[in-house]
Image (cartoon, helix red, strand yellow):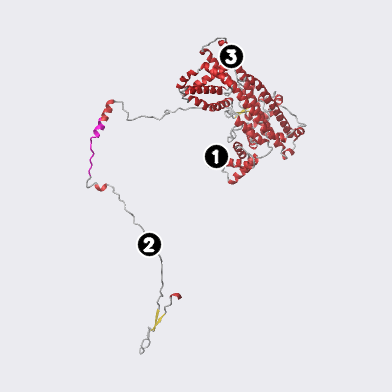
Amino acid sequence: MDLSQAECVIKNIIREIAQECADRGHSISETLVAFMVKAVVLDPRYEFNVDRKLTKTDVNKLIMICVDRLLEADRPSLDTIKMQIYFDMNYTSRAEFLAEHRSVLESRLAPVCREITDCRARSREEFECLYRKIVSYVLLQSGLGSPTDIGVVREATAALQSVFPQTELGTFLVLTKRDKERQLNELNMIVTGIRLFNKNCKKGGEGIDDLPAILNEALPATKQNVDSELQATQQLVYHYTAIIERLEKSRQQCYETDGLHDKLKEALFNVRQHEIFLSIIMAEIITCAKQVELIQEQFNKEMEQLNTVVKSKAAVPTAQVYPHFICLSNLWSHFQDEMVLLSVFSNLLTNLDPYMGSHSQLFPEGVIGPLLEGADVKSDAERLSEVSEEKINPSDIKNREWIFPDNTLHCQQLIVQYRGFCAYTLSARHGLLLKGNPAIGILKYQEKYYTFSSKEAATAFAQKPDYYIVKAAEEAKQSPELIQLLELHQQFSTITPYSQPGKCKKAIAKCDSSTQTDTHILEPNIVRSYEWNEWELRRKAIQMANLRQKVTRYMQTTLSHMRRDNTSQVYLPKNKAVQTKRENSCNVPKPQVFYAGLRGGNVTEPTKVIKFNLTRAVDET
């Protein structure tokens, strides 16, 4: 089966699974269905062989398993996968968020801009209408007030008339479309700067929100909200980890039979993933706060410079004030960008909460309390501090390269495998996620870096790294949410990464590279008939003129006339048949006669021949 046929089969399977879920009253996205199909195929418990073609029985089995897993209730594993897909579909870098926002804004303003640039005003009324459209466009693009507010429109019109009076519309209409768009953007920035300056001088600013004050109030509140949710999630992480460790130490086998261990593990993965996403949002909020502080400092500085230039002068050269107005407009647009980003991150924070419901239903406080009895609850920071003095001795383990933060530059930039969790406990303790401590030592194995939660874990992993790496992969096959949680996309190339798509997953400290340059990149284009000599061209022209006056004659001789090939065409004979109206037949009796006495008698007696007629009738034969 080629690639196109395989993709067609997979799409049909995904479509059938989504339709089956819809028939049962659940709307499932195709992205979630596709991930579940790949996860089920990778899971060794279902015994799907990816190296051979799936039979019809395999396809039906795959569809049935995927539908059952997608419709399972109270499964933290499914909620974790949904959370990962949602975050992947709605989170990207700051630059991409802002680029998408500007693209949407430009697409919405495109009809208004096109109406202005394509206008061919002739009468006075048409010029006035065009000028009102320019004022509306400036207000819409700047976002400083509504075009339906009369006070805002009057203030914007006054600011526009001070830099672009209505008498200059004739010059504007003569420009090309690109120059018109450029001038509109420039007018927008100058008018925005004038209105911001007037607001600062308390001489205007109708409909302009105080974005710096709003951001300075909203950012700490949002940060506190994210921090409170992060602390609550981390507390759940510490509780689930302590319960799993207590069950492992007590060596009770009953929790494996009733599925308690598996449910606790899925709940731990769920809250760990939520913790990671909250940490990403927190980092973005902190970045927004720093950007707002920097922008506000530049804005205040630019406003002071503009006040110094203007002071109480009646007229100021445009070359002195226009650059300040444009700078104020750009800084204000940065405030607006931070408002957009803050809104996006707040929505992300709110929409992550529904994916935390299953584990809270499975393990409410009434269930968690008894399970925590006798458990030693420790935070990640406490675990790291307990082993902060431990350090691996490289000489104890030969043929292994160790990196230590205290003697390595840019150690924080290394991309550690399993998102910094201990590689040994993940494999040896059935998916238990404990933070690795780089101070113990970072193992570099096959150009990848691993951290560990204790010195004993580092020693055990360094002795058989391949074994534990394979076991970690097997654990991820049985719990597909680990592929995104631990960033195992290179080991599972069929599962595409969710967040941070542009980030390299493999740290390469050394590499050999080579380049090769083609001798002739472009195909040669040599015209053989080209002549640089004028007299050679004249000679060829005379030769062609002489050929036009020549006559070609030919004749045929007796010996050559039989050499030519002649062809002829005839009509082939046709087969014809005639049919009468009726077919009849008749039969006659076959005559049979027997002569007796032909041998004769005595000499004296005459021969007597008797004739017997043996002919029988036709109906008797």
Identify the residue position indicated by label 3 in the image: 303
Q: CA distance from mark 1 to mark 2?
A: 62 Å
Give the number of the disc on residue 7: 1
**Number of disc labels:** 3
Q: Amino acid at mark 3?
A: Met
Dot in front, 2 or 3? 3
Q: CA distance from mark 2 to mark 3?
A: 112 Å
Magenta includes 27?
no
Q: Is residue 435 visible to the viewer in this orientation of the structure?
A: yes
Q: Residue at x 60, y 19 (%)?
A: 206
Earlier along the polypeptide chain: callout 2 or callout 3? 3
Quadrant in the rendering for residue 231: top right
Residue range corresponding to the magenta coloring? 542-555
User: Residue 179: x and y, percent?
Assistant: 47, 22
Magenta includes 544?
yes
User: Residue 66: x and y, percent?
Assistant: 63, 41
Identify the residue position indicated by label 2 in the image: 578
